[in-house]
Image: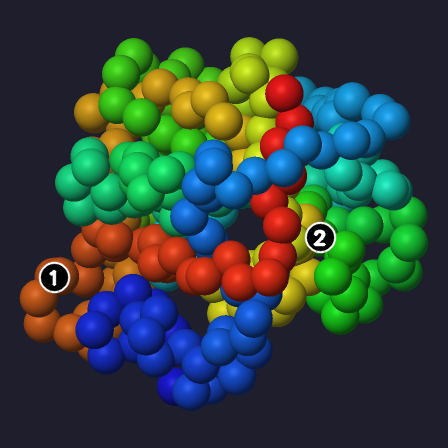
């Protein structure tokens, strides 16, 4: 079972804790960000990212979505709630079957059409990614909410490659230049929320400092439709359930209680 987690009824988020016990922990993600409960973030340094346009290598259908691999430590995230430097590992996306669902984090209960996750690891403090997974500050993930609107030109560079990776485990190169910074709200938008949580996919390790931007970015309806064309199985496999026809249409995890954790806000 542990190698066959997914988003169908038989292997979806409600079943993950059976194979990954930490998925039932007290510091799980995503969460609903309630503005009335957030507190101000006091930090000495502004959140900074330095992404190099040639840092991406290839895009893969993981069976859970598309994922772009980055060259290790060529792009750096620092400042804000972070005490060390974090290097970009990969970025991927979550989406829904309709334009009214798909994001993992919600704001005041409102769900967006999708959510990009840019995953970084704390290479300043830990000697390996495996070691980083064991600590609450091991990873930092930037969350970018997606809303229907204008075509996103940088994201289109990935979307045009998706027909080549329709099935699980298929991979294709991405032609440079591609600038991950263009996936973020312009200049960081109107700020972000931050809290301590977990990976939103198995093993659901509680090792993530989350930074969720307040402002969404726009993607077109055609781009959202392209996401939903990916399959969750290999070409020769059949889907474990009978109602999704193998399509990756709802690859998001429901929210968890924030519990005793604090959500901080940077303006």
Q: Judge by depth and name the residue closer to the eye, 10 or 101.
A: 101
Local crowd size for mark 2, using a 10 Å CA cut-off: few (<14), some (14–19), many (≥20): many
Q: Position of residue 8 (x, y in %)?
A: 23, 69
The quarter of the displayed image where residue 216 is located: top left
The reply to whether the C-beta atoms of the residues labelled 2 and 1 are less than 8 Å apart is: no
Residue at point 8%, 66% (across, down)? 243
Disc 1 crowd, CA 10 A, few/some/many (<14, 14-19, 20+): few
Give the Cα distance between marks 2 and 1.
34 Å
Q: From this viewpoint, which residue is outermost toward the front? A: 36
Residue name at image x 16 percent, y 74 percent: 241
Q: Which residue is mark 2?
A: 139
The one nearer the camera, 48 or 76, is: 48
Q: Can you identify the residue that label 1 sits on?
A: 245
> Residue 91 sits in which quadrant?
top right
| Quadrant of the rendered image containing residue 129 | bottom right
Where is residue 255 shown, x and y percent of the image?
Answer: 39, 57
Please state the horizontal and vertical placement of residue 77, each as a whole percent of the image. 76, 33
Q: What residue is drawn where x is 87% and y is 42%?
A: 84
Q: Residue at x 21, y 25 (%)?
A: 222
- Location of the N terminus (image quadrant): bottom left
Point out the image quarter for the C terminus: top right
Horizontally, is 23 left or right of 141 in the view?
left
Q: Earlier in the sequence, mark 2 or mark 1?
A: 2
39 up-or-down from 236: above or below: above
């Amino acid at each position: 079972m542990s190698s066959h987690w997914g988003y169908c009824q038989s292997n979806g988020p409600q079943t993950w804790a059976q194979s990954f016990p930490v998925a039932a922990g007290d510091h799980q993600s995503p969460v609903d960000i309630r503005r009335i409960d957030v507190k101000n973030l006091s930090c000495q340094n502004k959140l900074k990212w330095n992404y190099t346009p040639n840092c991406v290598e290839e895009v893969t259908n993981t069976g859970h979505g598309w994922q772009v691999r980055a060259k290790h430590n060529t792009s750096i995230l620092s400042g804000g709630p972070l005490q060390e430097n974090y290097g970009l590992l990969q970025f991927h996306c979550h989406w829904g079957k309709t334009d009214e669902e798909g994001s993992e984090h919600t704001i005041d209960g409102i769900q967006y059409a999708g959510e990009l996750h840019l995953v970084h690891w704390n290479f300043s403090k830990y000697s390996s990614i495996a070691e980083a997974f064991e600590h609450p500050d091991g990873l930092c993930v930037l969350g970018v909410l997606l809303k229907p609107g204008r075509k996103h030109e940088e994201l289109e560079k990935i979307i045009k490659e998706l027909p080549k990776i329709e099935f699980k485990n298929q991979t294709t190169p991405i032609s440079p230049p591609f600038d991950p910074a263009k996936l973020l709200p312009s200049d960081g938008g109107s700020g972000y929320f931050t809290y301590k949580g977990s990976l939103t996919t198995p093993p659901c390790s509680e090792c993530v400092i989350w930074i969720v931007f307040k402002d969404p970015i726009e993607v077109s309806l055609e781009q959202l439709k392209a996401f939903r064309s990916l399959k969750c199985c290999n070409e020769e496999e059949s889907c474990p359930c009978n109602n999704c026809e193998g399509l990756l249409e709802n690859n998001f995890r429901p929210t968890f209680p924030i519990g005793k954790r604090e959500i901080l806000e940077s303006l």
